[in-house]
Amino acid sequence: MLNISRLLCGSTAPGDSLRYGEPARRSDSIPRQQTIHHRPVVVWNITRRCNLHCIHCYSESKNQEYAGELSHQQANEVLDDLASFGIPVLLFSGGEPLMREGILDLIGEANERGLRTALSTNGTMITPEAAQALKAKGLAYVGISIDGLEAMNDRFRAKKGAYQEALAGIRNARAAGFRVSLRFTLTRYNMADLDAMFDLVVEEGIPRFCIYHLAYAGRGNKLLSFDLSHSETREAMDLIFRRTIDMQENGHDVEVLTVDNHADAVFLMHWVRRNMPERADEVEALVRRNGGNSSGKGIACIDNVGDVHPDQFWRTQTLGNVLERPFSEIWQDESNELLYGLRNRRGRIGGRCGSCAYFDMCNGNLRVRAESAAGDIWAQDPACYLTDEEISPDRATPVRVACKAPA
């Protein structure tokens, strides 16, 4: 994740201690760790079942039962291990996690063990009663996905009315006192709604806006033509920069993040050098400290049947299963060639990624995209939209974007 509002506007937010190794200055912040990614954030796809059928779903979920999902007792054994291992955040995801039988109890049991819990959901099942029940169980944070205005979102979700249900879920979660994140996956077909999504965030008082680049995984792997061209991605980033600064200047303290394309860090750094030179050293230090993509290091995934993956998108690569070995053992076993390679990528990744002067800011970007596009986990990420000049060692002319700097 790249915290655009932190880097452009200097505002701090929950999660900054994980991304930059510095204490955030809000009451709901994650405590500072000794080092970034000392333990991974764990995304737990607690069920694969979902009440929607999203066209870009990385887990290819449907509204059906899936065999082999962990029992409640098995899930509690995983919670014991995660708590003793000291992970900073446990994100319950799916499918639609609220379709998992006993999910409220699992959230409560996780919090009893001292785990900080969050929920990634389509929002359609968050009634006022559900929101209050989640709050009572100690859930810390709710992320709700909307992929455009009503017509576009309902098309993406394959259900008429999904937008209004998700919007109601956001309002119900906010009313229950949750810090809510709006999640938006950027594609060629909903890019026209991006500006309006910023308006929605302001109108609804949503404190966090996460803009995801498309991961080539699951049903999303069948939609490569949906992804933005490099020029379209640059246009979208220009808009994100402009709207982030405008919101801050107009008193809307919204945390804006981009996710799953770590070339964003380099693109932003070039822009800061040109437009905000007084912040250039700080920004460059922060993005270097963050280190770019952390699949297999700062992010981990446990799926519905207990398989462990380097991240939530990368289902073709499995590191082990929690029914056979505890997650903590799997994660610390660097005799696993893939796990070791992901933690030592320099010299392994080829193409433009391997020769990039800013490799330490991006860390080779999203490996599942490379595998999907080239059949090689160590190939270059095709979604890198930087020019050859922008990644050259001589640090060529900074990127020019249509975004004003703060006064």
Image (spheres, rainbow, N blue to C red):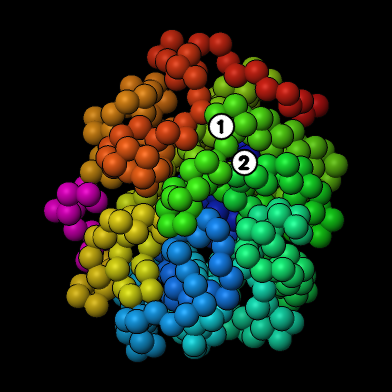
Residue 333 within the magenta-colored segment of the rendering: yes
Q: Residues within 10 Å of mark 2 (few under 14, many from 20)?
A: some
Whether residue 6 appears in this view of the structure is no
Quadrant in the rendering for residue 161? bottom right
Mark number for residue 188?
2
Residue at 73% across / 65% down in the picture? 163
Q: Which residues are magenta?
A: 329-340
Q: Is residue 352 above or below residue 116?
A: above
Mark 1 lies on residue = 229
Could you say which quadrant of the image residue 374 lies in? top left
Question: Which x, y percent locates residue 208?
Answer: 68, 54
- Cβ–Cβ under 8 Å for marks 1 and 2: yes
Callout 2: helix, strand or loop?
loop
Q: Along the line of sight, which residue is nearer the eye, 245 or 29? A: 245
User: Where residue 15 sits in the image (x, y, percent)?
Assistant: 55, 54
In the image: residue 130, left or right of residue 93: right
Which residue is rendered at x = 62% and y = 23% of the image? 271
Q: Quadrant of the C terminus?
A: top right
Question: On the rendered structure, is 342 left or right of 324?
Answer: right
Mark 1 or mark 2, which has the lower sequence index? 2
Left or right, residue 107 beside residue 318 = right
Q: 211 or 383, which lies in front?
A: 383
The amino acid type, in three-letter code, at marker 1 is: Ser
The answer to whether residue 321 is visible is yes
User: Residue at position x 28%, y 56% from top?
Assistant: 317
**Residue 282 on image: x %, y %:** 56, 30
Looking at the rendered structure, the kind of residue marked 2 is: Arg
